Amino acid sequence: MKATSALDSSVDSWNGGGKEPLKASYGKMMMWFFILSDALTFSGFLTAYGLMRFKFSDTWPIADQVFNHFPFLHGDHPMYFVALMTFVLIFSSVTMVLAVDAGHRQDKKKVTSYMFLTIIGGILFLGSQAWEWKNFIGGNMGAIQMNDGKIIQFVNADGKQIALTSFAKTGPIARVKHEKGNGIWFSSGEDLPEVSLSQVLDGFKANNSLSVRIEKLDPATGDKTILGRAQAERFLVESKRVVYGANLKVNEYGNTQFGDFFFFITGFHGFHVLSGIIINIIIFVNVLLGTYEKRKSYEMVEKVALYWHFVDLVWVFVFTFFYLI
């Protein structure tokens, strides 16, 4: 017994840490180590984004012109939906704080209620992000890609972007998509856009009030440069194809790297939110079963709260980099 006691004493005093170094359990310490390493990962991603944003600042898409959708509403509503998403996620962080506080007071009923609200907030945010991705990928206005890869959009006399379908000439034009039966090497072709390139160009020529907007920023206005009619017609000679939405190869909104970073960083953050929701559900079920009430400790709720607050904090930086700057 004496030997065992001596061993326990030496372990407890190893390096001065004891059973709870820095007055925190090893479980909390490990969560902090994970958060620190994950923070460095996100920092690297956002730093890379910042460097590209600075390098291509004169051709980088303007967030207000890209993220202007809102469910069930037509027209431009720049940043409204993203602001709503951010509010939902921050509110879920508040309910998580209240759950931790209730755990300190051993109040199982309130821990259950607040964790349930946190899970609902996370699901709403993730669903909103999926809806935003759908609109970003699908697009709604359309643009034309030039032979050199640059993107041009069409604007009316007021300088406001308009959809290609609003002016493109319609008519019986033969447009056949490659299928396995008629394609090359059994490969299916890309989905055909709503209108063809020739229909867009014919419609533009027939409407003298239209012009085009290029990727480059106008230093005087801080907005994308709108070309005069004659210059626009010369640009359109180099047209290559009609583009809708964004993917890893082409981007209706401008610089392709913007879309690449958007998919990667917001997708990586969305994966963290999904992981947080799953962990919260597991802890929530344990709370319902009375697991932590029997232990007389709700420390597990506190640990998962640390992760959830980290995910919320990261979104603040993602929101700032992508949507505000």
Image (cartoon, rainbow, N blue to C red):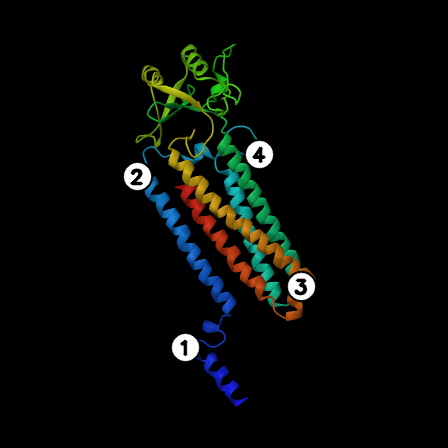
Q: Quadrant of the N terminus?
A: bottom right
Q: Mark 1: few, some, or many residues within 10 Å (few <14, many ≥20)?
A: few
User: What is the CA distance from the residue labelled 2 to the residue labelled 3?
Assistant: 53 Å
Q: Mark 2: few, some, or many residues within 10 Å (few <14, many ≥20)?
A: few
Badge 3 is on which residue?
108
Secondary structure at numbered mark 3:
helix
- 310 or 25, which is in the foreground? 25
The three-letter amino acid code for the residue at tag 1 is Asn
Residue 84's spot in the image, x, y percent?
54, 42
Q: Residue at x 64, y 60 (%)?
A: 111
Tell me, yes or no, if residue 77 can be seen here.
Answer: no
Mark nearer the N terminus (1 vs 3): 1
Q: Residue at x 39, y 41 (%)?
A: 325
Mark nearer the N terminus (4 vs 3): 4
Say which of marks 4 and 2 sits in front. Answer: 2
Residue 236's spot in the image, x, y percent?
36, 17
User: What is the CA distance from the residue labelled 2 to the residue labelled 1?
Assistant: 48 Å
Badge 1 is on which residue?
15
The three-letter amino acid code for the residue at tag 3 is Lys
